[in-house]
Image (cartoon, grey):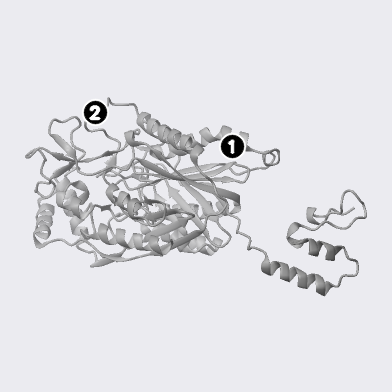
């Protein structure tokens, strides 16, 4: 006997009884009676169906979610960046990944991708989103790609990170392809889901690294001037006065699980630059990877217990955790007032990653989930000005280069080179901004190392209940201090470290909030 789908099987109590119809074909008792009348006309049945459909409440689209990871580990020997002088890698301590979450509300599909990289050049985002649009029919404005800012990864910023309009190199093309592959696999893993927003507090790991010091104790900057604040001052120094800005201790996250309660993914953001303390020449994803693997481990037991008898027999895709960088342009993991003893390689990375994962894991019990989460995105590229050299700065750069390099880490020479490169820039550029709405949650992004006070202001003024920011998205444009921080000076404001107009943060934040308002 041929197998019949469940909706068309005969009534088990009578081998010859009438076929059972699914509930959406039997909207009322009247319809049920019509179907049981042997001589009911087809026209009558159809008209009754149409009438019932006209007055029936509209069905809500079913939220679906899928997640996947792609390995983006580079070859050994590639240059590791993050310091002033790049150096070749000699060992892969732990693999780098592009972690992906895809959400679909029945009308809109979006993808969130977090890459274990210091930053991604704009060309990487463009190439990846072009491939995703072509291969998976997902519009480029529906794909968010950001970098974690690990300082122990091979560069995805190109051969000359501060040169504009470079063609993609082999590693950049590889990363773009792997991002597209990951999005494709996440789409294949889509299944009915529910989602919730949560937060966890982790203040003990974040410290503002810009400090006011006693008059006369801030050293000269590379340009021969004196700043009002010092980035990474001597730890425990008696001349420390106070930090120049706030920190953001909150881990914001989205938790996604299937209808059986089995975790699918967690997408988090935490405003901590990176931790560091890796082996010399090692490639590592830093605490971002430790967080992801530790949370996966903590949830493994709950995932097993949550499975029903039916779901336990399914070959479900693995859970994927990811943590994006929030707004940490002026934040790191160093307690300057209370110096800690030197630790072994990776010891502090493991401590921070595991602790943040434990805090998020504990907060998951308070998350309220919903199978309905309207999705929407806005992507814009507003115009801002590149920072231009004054006549005095131009003359300084020429004289410094003419005098020659005094050492490998001659900061004056390094910044004279950077300033000279900026002389070639056009007057303006466009900066990719992205805002995504996921239910009552709003994610705003910028392609900079964004100061934490900007992220705090976005949270405060965001028109949706749960707002947070992710930095280093769709490109790498350097540091983004506020106008107040520009006046204080310091490493993050130096010409070459900062490359855009001094009011850029104000303009871009206002634009981002306007974009968020349009999605409310």
**Residue 240 rendering spot, x and y as whole percentages:** 15, 35
**Residue 249 rendering spot, x and y as whole percentages:** 34, 40
Residue 98 as seen in the image, left or right of residue 2: left
Q: Nearer the viewer, residue 350 or 418?
A: 350
The residue sitting at the bottom extreme is: 43
Q: Nearer the viewer, residue 319 or 73?
A: 319
Task: For mark 1, give the secondary structure.
Answer: helix
**Residue 39 rendering spot, x and y as whole percentages:** 90, 70
**Residue 107 rendering spot, x and y as whole percentages:** 56, 63
Q: Is 107 drawn above or below residue 242 in the view shown?
A: below
Residue 267 as seen in the image, left or right of residue 271: right
> Which residue is drawn at the image coordinates 60% and 44% (left, top)?
317
> Which residue is drawn at the image coordinates 12% and 61% (left, top)?
390
Q: Nearer the viewer, residue 4 or 91?
A: 4
- The residue indicated by pointer 1 is 303
Q: Is residue 189 visible?
A: no
Task: For mark 2, give the secondary structure.
Answer: loop
Q: Which quarter of the figure has residue 331? A: top left
Residue 508 as seen in the image, left or right of residue 183: left
Give the class, few, some or many, for how many residues have Cα within 10 Å of label 1's Cα (few <14, many ≥20): some
- The residue indicated by pointer 2 is 339
Q: Is 379 drawn above or below residue 262 in the view shown?
A: below
Q: Is residue 145 visible?
A: yes
> Which residue is drawn at the image coordinates 7% and 39% (left, top)?
215
> Which residue is drawn at the image coordinates 60% and 56% (left, top)?
62
Whole-angstrom CA distance, mark 2 to mark 1, is 40 Å
């Amino acid at each position: 006997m041929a197998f019949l789908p469940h909706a068309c099987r005969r009534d088990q109590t009578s081998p010859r009884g009438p076929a059972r119809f699914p509930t959406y074909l039997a909207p009322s008792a009247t319809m049920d009676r019509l179907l049981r009348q042997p001589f009911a006309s087809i026209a009558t049945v159809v008209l009754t169906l149409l009438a019932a459909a006209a007055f029936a409440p509209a069905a809500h689209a079913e939220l679906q979610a899928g997640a996947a990871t792609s390995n983006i580990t580079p070859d050994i020997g590639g240059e590791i960046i993050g310091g002033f002088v790049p150096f070749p890698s000699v060992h892969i301590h732990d693999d780098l990944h592009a972690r992906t979450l895809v959400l679909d509300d029945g009308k809109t599909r979006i993808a969130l991708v977090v890459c274990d990289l210091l930053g991604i050049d704009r060309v990487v985002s463009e190439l990846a989103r072009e491939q995703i649009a072509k291969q998976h029919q997902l519009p480029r404005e529906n794909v968010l790609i950001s970098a974690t800012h690990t300082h122990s990864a091979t560069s995805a910023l190109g051969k000359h990170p501060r040169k504009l309009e470079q063609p993609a190199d082999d590693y950049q093309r590889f990363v773009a392809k792997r991002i597209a592959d990951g999005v494709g696999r996440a789409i294949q893993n889509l299944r009915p889901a529910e989602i919730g927003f949560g937060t966890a507090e982790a203040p003990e790991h974040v410290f503002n690294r810009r400090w006011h010091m006693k008059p006369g104790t801030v050293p000269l900057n590379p340009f021969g001037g004196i700043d009002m604040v010092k980035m990474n001052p001597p730890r425990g120094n008696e001349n420390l006065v106070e930090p120049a800005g706030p920190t953001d201790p909150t881990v914001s996250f989205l938790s996604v699980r299937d209808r059986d309660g089995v975790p699918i993914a967690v997408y988090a953001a935490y405003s901590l630059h990176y931790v560091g303390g890796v082996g010399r020449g090692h490639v590592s994803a830093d605490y971002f990877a430790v967080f992801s693997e530790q949370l996966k481990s903590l949830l493994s037991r709950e995932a097993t217990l949550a499975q029903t008898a039916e779901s336990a027999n399914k070959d479900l895709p693995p859970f994927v955790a990811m943590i994006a960088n929030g707004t940490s342009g002026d934040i790191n993991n160093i307690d300057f007032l209370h110096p800690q003893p030197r630790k072994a390689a990776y010891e502090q990375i493991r401590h921070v990653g595991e602790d943040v994962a434990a805090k998020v894991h504990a907060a998951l019990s308070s998350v309220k989930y919903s199978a309905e989460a309207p999705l929407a995105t806005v992507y814009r590229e507003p115009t801002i000005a590149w920072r231009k050299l004054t006549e005095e700065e131009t003359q300084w750069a020429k004289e410094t280069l003419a005098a020659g390099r005094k050492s490998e880490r001659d900061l004056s020479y390094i910044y004279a080179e950077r300033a000279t490169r900026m002389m070639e820039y056009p007057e303006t550029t466009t900066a990719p901004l992205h805002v995504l709405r996921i239910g009552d949650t709003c994610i705003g992004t910028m392609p900079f190392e964004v100061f934490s006070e900007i992220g705090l202001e976005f949270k405060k003024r965001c028109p949706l209940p749960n707002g947070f920011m992710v930095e280093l998205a769709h490109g790498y444009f350097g540091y983004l201090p506020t106008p107040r921080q520009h006046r204080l000076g310091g490493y993050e404001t130096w010409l070459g470290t900062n490359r855009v107009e001094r009011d850029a943060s104000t303009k871009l934040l206002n634009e981002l909030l306007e974009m968020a308002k349009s999605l409310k």
